[in-house]
Image (spheres, grey):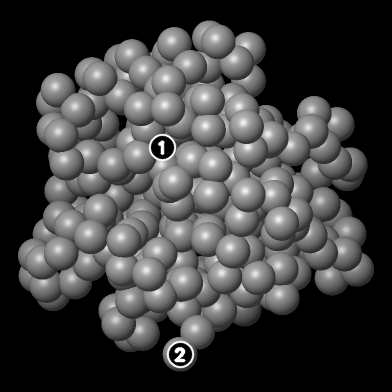
Amino acid sequence: MRSLRDNLAISAGKATAIGHFNVSDLVGLNAVAAAARRLGLPVLIGTSEGERAFIGVRQAAAVVRSIRDEYDFPIFLNGDHTHSLAKAEEAARAGYDMIGFDGSTLAFEENVRQTKQAVEAIKSINADIVVEGELGYIGSGSEIHDTVPESSLIFTRPDEAREFAEAAGVDVLAPAVGNMHGLLATMVRGEARKHLDIERIAQIKAATGMPPTLHGGSGTDDDDFRRAIEAGMTIVHISTELRLAWRRGLEAALAAEPDNLVPYQLFRKASEAMEEVVAKRLKLFNPL
Ligand SMILES: [Zn+2]
C-alpha cells in the first residue's frame, strides 16, 4: 500500500488531485469510501475538530484504517482545521495520516510560530504524517452564507507563502486564492459559482515548491477546478456540497416514508445523494 505522501507525489506528477471530503458519521464516511472504491481513486476523509469529536477521534482512525486494510484501498484520514497543539497531538496519536493545522486567523508571525510547534510535535509522534499549514483566511463554516466574508477577499501572496512554508516546515500549504468555506445562497440556487486565481496558484506552487491544497471547493466552477489542478492543486476539499446532499437526501426519505422508523433505510437516500456528489467531483479532479 502506497502512503499518502506517495499518492500526493503521484497526483502532482499527473496533474490530478486527491478529493478530500468531510464527514460527520459512518454514513458519510462509507458513502465517500464507496464512491472512491467504485472509481478506483485515492481519497481523503476529512474530520474537523467538531466532526471528529462527534465520530470519536480514535474511532474515525480505526474505521479508515479498517477500510484501507480490508480492501487494500488508498483511503486516508485528515485532521482538518486543527486549531490547537493538544488536538494535533491527539489526532497524531490516534493514527491520522494527515493533520491540517489552522492558524489562518492569527497574525503571520504567530501563525508561523504555532504551526512550526505543531509540525515538530506531530513529527515526533509519527514522522510519516503529512502536515498542512494555512495562510490566508477564507471564512469559516461549511454552511450557507448570504454574503462573502470580507476578510476572505485578501489573497495569499507567493512571497509570504514561501516564507511561511520554509519557516513553519509544513509539507503542504492551503492558501487563499478565491476559494471560500461554505456556499452563498446564490450558489445553492445555481445562479453563481466560485472562481479561482489560477495564475496565483501556479506562482504559489513555484514559490513554495510544494503542492497547494484547495479548501472551500464546494460551488467552484468546473473549469476553474480543472485549471487549478493543472496549475498544481493536489488536494481539493469538498464539504458543503456533501452536507447539502445529506440534508436533501434525508429530507426526501423522511417525506416519502413518514411512518418508516428504520434508520438504515432512511439514511440510504442521504448516503446515495452523498455518493453521487463524491463520484462527480472525483471524476472532475481525476481526468482520464
Ligand atoms: Zn477548510
| Residue at the disc numbered 2 | 288
x 57%, y 70%: residue: 230
Q: In the image, what residue type sits under mark 1?
A: Glu
Q: Quadrant of residue 31?
A: bottom left
Distance from the alpha carbon under mark 1 to that under mark 2: 28 Å
Q: Amino acid at mark 2?
A: Leu
Q: Position of residue 239 (x, y in %)?
A: 56, 54
Element type at mark 1: strand
Q: Nearer the viewer, residue 40 or 278?
A: 40
Given residues 275 and 119, the one toward you in this image is: 119
Question: Which residue is label 1 attached to?
Answer: 132
Q: Which mark is residue 218?
A: none
Horizontal and vertical percent position of residue 5: 25, 53
Left or right: 244 as drawn, with respect to 205? right
Q: Is residue 115 above or below residue 38?
A: above
Direction from residue 84 to residue 151 in the image, left or right: right
Question: Is 257 above or below relative to 55?
Answer: below
Question: Foreground: 83 or 118?
Answer: 118
Residue 76 in sight in this render: yes
Quadrant placement of the C terminus: bottom left
Q: Residue at x 23, y 26 (%)?
A: 122
Q: Is residue 109 left or right of residue 61?
A: right
Taking the spot 25% from the left edge, 20% from the top edge, the residue there is 120
Instruction: Residue 209 in the image: state x and y as whole percent.
Output: 44, 46
Residue 253 appears in view:
no
Q: From what the image shows, is residue 169 above or below residue 279?
A: above
